[in-house]
Amino acid sequence: MAGSSLNPLLGTSESSSLDSELLLPILPSDDTAVAARHQPRLKGRLYRNWTHNEQLFVRCCGVIISRATFFGSEGISSINSFLKATFPSHYPGSMPSYIFYDNNCQFLKHLRANEDHYWDSVGLPVDVFHFNCKHTVRDNFCQENCNPARFKELIGPDGKWVFNSSAAEQANVWFGKFQSVVQDMPVIRYNFFLDEMIAIRNREIVKELSAQHQSPHLLSEEFLRGTSLTSPII
């Protein structure tokens, strides 16, 4: 089953602090004048430290399976670390067949530049919405490697998409409504609140899927660890 990530801009407050890594040792007197020119200055932080974004991994059925807070930026290397934490190597059975992401072309370039083969067995198409709106036909790399239409197995016999690649965008609309609620929360309450809201939403989505006879289920640990080829419904 495919997944997708999204990034609503949410903030959380942090207590004032001093950067401990800038607390410098006492230098010998003969080196002080020269070294002082190359040392960072001690800075106090008397303001709140805002997060950059929340990153979610959303199954195409709408269930959110992981969340991470990004502080600096939505960098490609951070996305890679987030995905590896979501699908760790000791659970090979958890690896998805496809991951929809609006910047998969840059993600794939990053993987190849760093000779990272972790996702070699996973298709990396751009989600349909962003591919049609944000990716130019002149980008040959994206067209050849991340065009969702080139993944023929994603298109059903009726010509329609098998998966809802916009599930993350739809979750983003819901998730973004909490921005004004959480922006002044301390970090513990912030994380607790968002995790609880996601859990409540997931339960409602599973209930709706069950009513539609879609058979939502959890994979067994034996299947996730790769020790069983079958996954009984839990």
Image: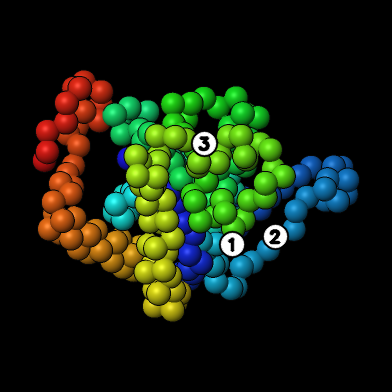
Report whether 220 appears left or right of 28: left
Query: Are dots 2 and 3 in contact, CB under 8 Å?
Result: no
Query: Residue at coordinates 25% horizontally, 26% vertically from top-left?
Result: 225
Q: Position of residue 207 (x, y in %)?
A: 15, 59
- Residue 222 vertical placement versus 25 (above, below): above
Location of residue 223 in the rendering, given as x and y in whole percent from the top left corner: 21, 28
Q: Residue at x 50, y 41 (%)?
A: 149
Q: Which residue is mark 1?
A: 18
Between disc 3 and disc 1, the foreground one is 3
Q: Report whether 219 appears left or right of 97.
A: left
* Residue 61 appears in the rendering: yes
Residue drawn at x 68%, y 38% is 140
**Quadrant of the image containing the N terminus:** top left
Q: Is residue 186 visible?
A: no
What residue is at 47 percent from the left and 35 percent from the top? 151
Circle number at residue 70: none
Calculate the distance from the C-alpha at mark 3 to the C-alpha at mark 1. Answer: 51 Å
> Relative to residue 226, is residue 87 depicted above or below?
below
What amino acid does circle 1 point to? Leu
- For the residue marked with disc 3, what is the amino acid? Arg
Residue 150: which disc?
3
Q: Are marks 1 and 2 in contact (CB under 8 Å)?
A: yes
Q: Earlier in the sequence, mark 1 or mark 2?
A: 1
Q: Disc 1 on helix, strand or loop?
A: strand
- Real-space CA distance between mark 2 and mark 3, rounded to the nearest whole angstrom: 53 Å
In this image, 30 relative to 45: left or right? right
> Which residue occupies the foreground of this view, 131 or 223?
131
Residue 215 to residue 10: above or below: above
The residue wearing badge 2 is 42
Q: Nearer the viewer, residue 7 or 100?
A: 100
Which quadrant does the C terminus fall into? top left
